[in-house]
């Protein structure tokens, strides 16, 4: 019998390695080997950084013969200060041990600064291309975005939840929903945690989730995915949708500061211009249409077209020096059944979008909390309340005025980093033609 005591080996960080001096020891991948004649540079890649190692026959015991990129090795050596090295020091190899060797050579060079691959080749070889430090940096920034969101939510009294992704009814309805065979009944992949967020307002008052969302939309554009990660929150006892907008403004201010504090190297690698969030300008949908018309464009009647969003954001950047803009009071007929109508003009809903550098990243608003009002609106929209019995249970037994929103994580990262395609911000993207890898 053996016992596992829970002792774990931690990855070696750069500071610890540098302080180890002659007793430096580290495991990683051979990222590149450069023969300089009398000596060689071996660039070692770990899960967090790359490190310049020096092989020199005068102090290195084991020759580099047979090593190639992708080989996993453990290096023993001496950490020596070197201001010209990326990390301010380098590792002089005394000895190394091969842990595992690749069966084949890479089909392309992943050790270049820029991969220079078309997007399909990049995505087809994702297990390899993500080993490129610049590609990997996208997802360190994405991690910080999600962590910054969660950090703010917890600081402001939100409880994290985990909602089902197999459901009996879609929150958004319509044709953009994936159907499943679920034993002897029909089921769907969830389009949104909306129903569960509202139910949990009656339990925790404030809730958030970071989880996948599924949309069966037959789009094949640079801004659409069929599976993406949603950053969602819902909050109770609001005075109006402006409370939700204020919460998002404060959250983004915290989130961007969090990313800057935790991703200095990755932001520099991509030359990311992180916005400073003070106050975010807001226009109603009708005001936005007027601005777009003055810019010489014909705006969409019921929603903003992609080119409208770009033109509007360019205008706001010039006039207000803001990378973000809220658009409020969308036509009620084009918003979901749970969106509260504006009591002063029922043609419009208390619903908003947030645009960031020319792209919608958020949809949110105030929800209907009154049971009878919600049932009446369902019927007006041709829905049978009996199909939503568990959802309406929360309303029937009392909910406070509440609202919330959903943010597309990949879209937010795409616009933050200036990526050209949302698939670049998805680890393993799913679209109309991609189920692998």
Image (cartoon, rainbow, N blue to C red):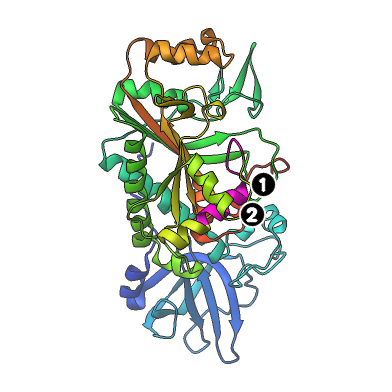
Instruction: Give the CA distance from mark 2 to mark 1.
Output: 7 Å
Mark 2 surroundings: few (<14), some (14-19) or many (≥20) residues within 10 A = some
Q: Quadrant of residue 14?
A: bottom left
Q: Which residue is nearer to you in this view: 437 or 246?
A: 246
Report the residue that reaches farthest toward the top. 386
Residue position for label 1: 437
Q: Residue at x 48, y 78 (%)?
A: 53
The part of the chain drawn in magenta is: 301-313
Q: Residue at x 65, y 22 (%)?
A: 180
Residue 389 position, x and y percent, is 48, 10
User: Magenta segment: does it hold 420?
Assistant: no
Point out which mark residue 31 bears. Answer: none
Residue 143 position, x and y percent, is 44, 51
From the image, give the main secondary structure of the stretch colored magenta: helix
Q: Quadrant of residue 186?
A: top right
Name the element at disc 1: loop
Quarter holding the N terminus is: top left
Left or right relative to 311: residue 204:
left
Residue 250 position, x and y percent, is 31, 47
Asked if one can make out residue 426 in the rendered structure from this viewpoint, the answer is no
Residue position for label 2: 126
């Amino acid at each position: 019998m053996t016992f596992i005591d829970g002792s774990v080996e931690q990855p070696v960080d750069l500071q610890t390695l540098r302080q180890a001096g002659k007793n430096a020891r580290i495991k990683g991948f051979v990222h590149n080997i450069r023969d300089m004649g009398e000596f060689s540079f071996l660039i070692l890649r770990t899960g967090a950084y790359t490190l310049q190692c020096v092989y020199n026959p005068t102090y290195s015991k084991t020759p580099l013969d047979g090593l190639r990129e992708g080989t996993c090795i453990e290096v023993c050596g001496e950490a020596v200060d070197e201001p010209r090295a990326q990390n301010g020091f380098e590792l002089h190899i005394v000895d190394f041990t091969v842990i595992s060797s690749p069966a084949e050579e890479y089909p392309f060079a992943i050790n270049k600064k820029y991969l220079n691959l078309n997007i399909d080749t990049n995505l087809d070889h994702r297990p390899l291309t993500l080993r490129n430090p610049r590609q990997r940096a996208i997802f360190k920034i994405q991690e910080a975005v999600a962590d910054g969101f969660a950090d703010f939510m917890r600081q402001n009294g939100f409880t994290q939840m985990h909602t089902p992704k197999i459901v009996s009814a879609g929150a958004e309805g319509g044709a953009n929903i994936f159907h499943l065979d679920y034993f002897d009944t029909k089921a769907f992949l969830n389009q949104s945690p909306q129903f569960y967020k509202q139910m949990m307002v009656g339990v925790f008052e404030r809730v958030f989730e970071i989880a996948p969302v599924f949309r069966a939309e037959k789009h094949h554009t640079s801004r659409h995915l069929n599976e993406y990660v949603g950053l969602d929150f819902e909050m109770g006892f609001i005075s109006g949708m402006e409370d939700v907008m204020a919460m998002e403004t404060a959250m983004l201010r915290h989130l961007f500061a969090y990313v800057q504090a935790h991703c200095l190297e990755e932001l520099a690698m991509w030359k990311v211009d992180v916005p400073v969030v003070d106050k975010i300008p807001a226009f109603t949908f009708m005001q936005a249409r007027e601005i777009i018309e003055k810019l010489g464009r014909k705006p969409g009647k019921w929603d903003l077209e992609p080119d409208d969003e770009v033109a509007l954001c360019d205008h706001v950047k010039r006039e207000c020096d803001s990378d973000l803009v809220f658009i409020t009071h969308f036509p009620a007929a084009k918003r979901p059944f749970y969106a509260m109508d504006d009591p002063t003009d029922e043609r419009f809903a208390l619903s908003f979008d947030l645009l960031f550098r020319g792209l919608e990243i958020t949809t949110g608003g105030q929800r209907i909390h009154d049971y009878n009002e919600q049932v009446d609106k369902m019927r007006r929209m041709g829905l049978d309340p009996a199909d939503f019995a568990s959802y309406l249970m929360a309303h029937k037994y009392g909910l406070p005025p509440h609202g919330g929103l959903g943010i597309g994580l990949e879209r937010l990262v795409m616009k933050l980093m200036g990526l050209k395609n949302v698939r670049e911000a998805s680890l393993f993207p799913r679209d109309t033609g991609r189920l692998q890898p």
